[in-house]
Image (spheres, rainbow, N blue to C red):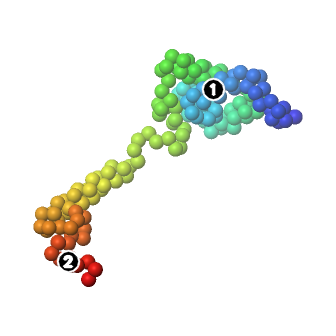
Amino acid sequence: MNFFRVLLNPESEETEHLDRKLVSSAANLLQVGEFQLLQLAYHAWFGQDLPQELVSRLFTTYMMHHQVPPWVRHYAHSILERHRSGKLNINNPAYHRYDNDYIQQRPAGSNRFFLVTVLIVLIMLASIFVASTVKKEVTSILPPYFERKELPSNPTG
């Protein structure tokens, strides 16, 4: 019956469970999921990652029984306070330590890509320069390099 009640009035979840609303507000500010915020709170409070054996128990108590541990509440309050004071940097890598797709640095091959790109551009510029100095009366700046004397004077033939 709880499922239908939530479908008919989705705001009731937020008004009945203020601690859950606090956690979801902090998670939305950081642009992470609620459970990821729980992981961040655990790491901030205990100084280590959430142990695997506590994951299902914490998930069940939070999602099914709507119980928010005090250390999560404290962490969510601190996030909201930093936001109010303007000191929250949502791009801080510490908030995205559990994101698989969060890129903290350039990919390893990007330096090689930029080097090869610059090398190709330099080779192209050098070949254009050499070609323009070798041929006297070129018809175009890009290959194929024909001189005007090599082209027929009557194009229709």
Dot 1: element: helix
Distance from label 1 to label 2 (Cα)? Answer: 77 Å
Q: Secondary structure at mark 2?
A: loop
Q: Residue furthest right?
A: 1
Residue drawn where x is 57% and y is 21% of the image: 80
Check the image and report above or below for 131 versus 4.
below
Q: Nearer the viewer, residue 20 or 116?
A: 116
User: Is the C-beta separation of discs 1 and 2 under 8 Å?
Assistant: no
Between discs 1 and 2, the one toward the N terminus: 1
Residue under label 2, please give it: 153
Q: Is 144 or 92 nearer to us in this picture?
A: 144
130 is higher (above) or lower (below) than 80:
below
- What residue is shown with label 1? 25
Residue drawn 17% across and 67% down?
138
Residue 28: percent from left, percent from top: 60, 30
Q: Amino acid at mark 2?
A: Ser
Please give left or right for residue 109 compared with residue 129 in the image: right
The image shows residue 148 at horizontal and vertical percentages of: 17, 72
Quadrant where the C terminus sits is bottom left
Question: Label 2: how many residues lie within 10 Å, few (<14), some (14-19) or many (20+)?
Answer: few
Q: Is residue 54 visible?
A: yes
| Amino acid type, callout 1 | Ser
From the top left corner, tell me how far across and down residue 113 is, in percent.
Answer: 34, 53
